Image: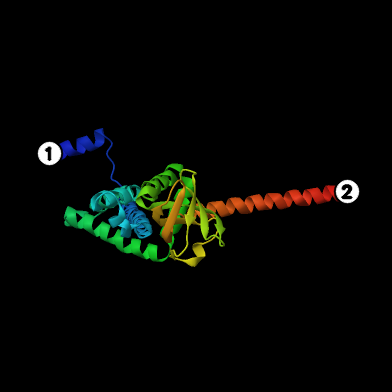
Amino acid sequence: MTKFSEEIIGKIKCEHIAPVPRWCFLARGYALWVLFAISVILGSLSFAVIVHIANSGDWDVFNHLGGNWITSTVMLLPYFWLVFLGIFALVAYLNWKHTKYGYRFRRRWIVLGSVGMSVFLGNVFYAFGMAQEIDKLMTKSLPFYDESKHKARRELWLKPENGFLGGKIISVDEITEELIVEDENGDRWNVDDNNVIWENEKLEQKGKIIKVIGEKDGERKFVAKEIRRCGDCQADEDEDEDRKEHEDGRDEDSKDEQEERDND
């Protein structure tokens, strides 16, 4: 036995080195693949929400905005989900890189591949309506997420002097053809909707959150030219409806209790 062999054997005995079972390598490999798949799926969900928010945005009003195209785009970008997409793409890259065959691929191809899969699956998830449900869930669960959406909406649709007004319909007067709209600041506006272009006639009802393009006509008065739906306000409307149903149910319970007491 050579001196080198003896040194190796001695080191093994001194440090109590034992062979690693094969199942440990298999488990590590499977874990990396599972983590890679989870990262891609989470990245796909992030991209799906980005598509949902982008489609709900108001990209066609750039020409009416006071700022330039770049400023308006920066204002409407969903940074929250862009950051998540970047994080999950990085995690997917790191997991793929440490798999059995990860060394065979260049870094850029791994990154492009993981992002490409996220984009493809993201569009699939969006087509099945998963993005809107995630957006609703995040809005109800995370106050700062909901506030960021309101902030973006205020920055764009709380500029009546520039012809943009957004808010909730408080009442509809079909005789005078006026709406009472409460904006994000709680101020109420008389909106003249005579000869207005409605994106959808079903929007003309109490409780709907709308976006109005028109002209300011005096203190708290606004002449509408176009009224469109608020694509990112569905969660707010649902919350109001749930609150109303809860209050109606509580009123019914109070009535039932009162009737029982009267009968007694």
SS for dot 2: loop
Along the line of sight, which residue is nearer the eye, 67 or 234?
Answer: 67
Question: Does residue 234 appear anywhere in the picture?
Answer: no
Residue 23: percent from the left, percent from the top? 34, 52
Question: Does residue 219 appear anywhere in the picture?
Answer: yes
Total marks in image: 2
Q: Is residue 145 above or below residue 173?
A: above
Along the line of sight, which residue is nearer the eye, 185 or 110?
Answer: 185
Residue 82: percent from the left, percent from the top? 31, 50
Who's the residue at 63% across and 51% down the image?
246
**Mark 2 or mark 1, which is nearer the start of the sequence?**
1
SS for dot 1: helix
Location of mark 1 (residue): 4
Q: Quadrant of the N terminus?
A: top left
* Dot 2 crowding, Cα within 10 Å, few <14, some 14–19, many 20+: few
Location of mark 2 (residue): 264
Mark 2 residue type: Asp
Residue 231: percent from the left, percent from the top? 42, 58
